[in-house]
Amino acid sequence: MITVIPSADRHHWANEWLTSRQSFPATGNYDLFGNAHGVLVVHNDDVVDPGEGLDAHHHENMEILTWVLDGAVTHRDSVGNTTTLQAGTLGAMSAGTGITHGEANASTRAERRPLRVVQMWVAPHTDGLPPRQSEHRFDDALDTGQPVVVASGRPEHEGSGAAPIANRFAALHIARPLAGTTIALPAAPFAHLYVARGSATVDVDGEHHALREGDAVRLTDSGDVQVTAVDDGTRPEILYWEMHASFDLVGS
């Protein structure tokens, strides 16, 4: 089964300094796990004004990944990490037994550079792990146009350079396919594909869909996913979650 969620139909939330487009409602009154797909419970495309950000707040037992599309984000946490993540960098935080952190646009109001990130939350397969934070840069690997496994808890990706996550059922692939080329993404019981930039077509099990920036696709029990980059002047950027369980089964 394949369900396309056009950009205009994704959940929208905004305040004075943040604009958030969400695959699953993550602000206001929402059911975090009731709206999940596979083990993915949050998938937000956020634009943060210069000099703004989230004050320190607490998380437990969640894998939180932040992919920086534009600008830079400053991360500070209660386990002693202070770092600035540039575009093309993935921040991977395992909240585990508990971590307090804050995130902000590293640009000042005078510099006037917006920050755009995709933040994703994945349910861990085990609660109560030690909290940790790491950062991983993938610009060079993505230049080839082929998919790159940037985060994974699956055994076959151990030692690949992917950021480790505490979910043995899930992997995040990112690709920037070259114009006119087709890439293959793996079949999975659950998958979520997001077009962060540009335009592409997706072919799954005989179905063909044209996608634009901001469109998302949910897949269930699909075959391999073929993505072709459309030459419209913007190189596509595709984020794809491969998931082999749903959140209620990750601890089994």
Image: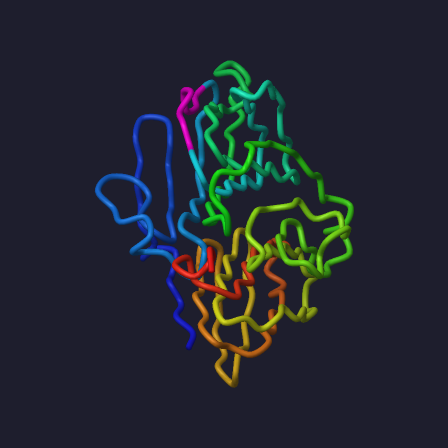
**12 displayed left or right of 204:** left
Which residue is at the front of the view, 140 or 77? Answer: 77
Q: Name the spot of residue 218 as percent of width and height, x first.
A: 43, 66
Query: In which image quadrant can residue 5 be found?
Result: bottom left
Q: Position of residue 154 (x, y in %)?
A: 64, 58
Whether the magenta-drawn stretch holds residue 55 is answered as yes
Q: Identify the residue at the far left of this view.
A: 29
Q: Quadrant of the N terminus?
A: bottom left
Observer-nearest residue: 180 or 62? Answer: 62
Give the residue drawn at x 52%, y 16%: 108
Looking at the image, residue 135 lies above or below residue 120: above
Q: Residue 251 placed where, x, y %?
A: 46, 55
Question: Which image quarter: residue 242?
Answer: bottom right
> What residue do we see at 50% from left, 29% from top?
114
Residue depicted at 45% across the width and 54% down the height:
40
Quarter of the view holding residue 91 = top right
The magenta stretch spans residue 154: no
Q: Which residue is outermost to the bottom?
A: 206
Please state the horizontal and vertical placement of residue 237, each as a whole percent of the image: 60, 54
Q: In the displayed structure, does residue 89 sit left or right of residue 167?
A: right
From the image, give the main secondary structure of the stretch colored magenta: strand
- Magenta stretch? 52-59
Q: Residue at x 31, y 57 (%)?
A: 9
Exactly how many numbered labels are in the figure? 0
Front residue (pair 229, 43)? 43
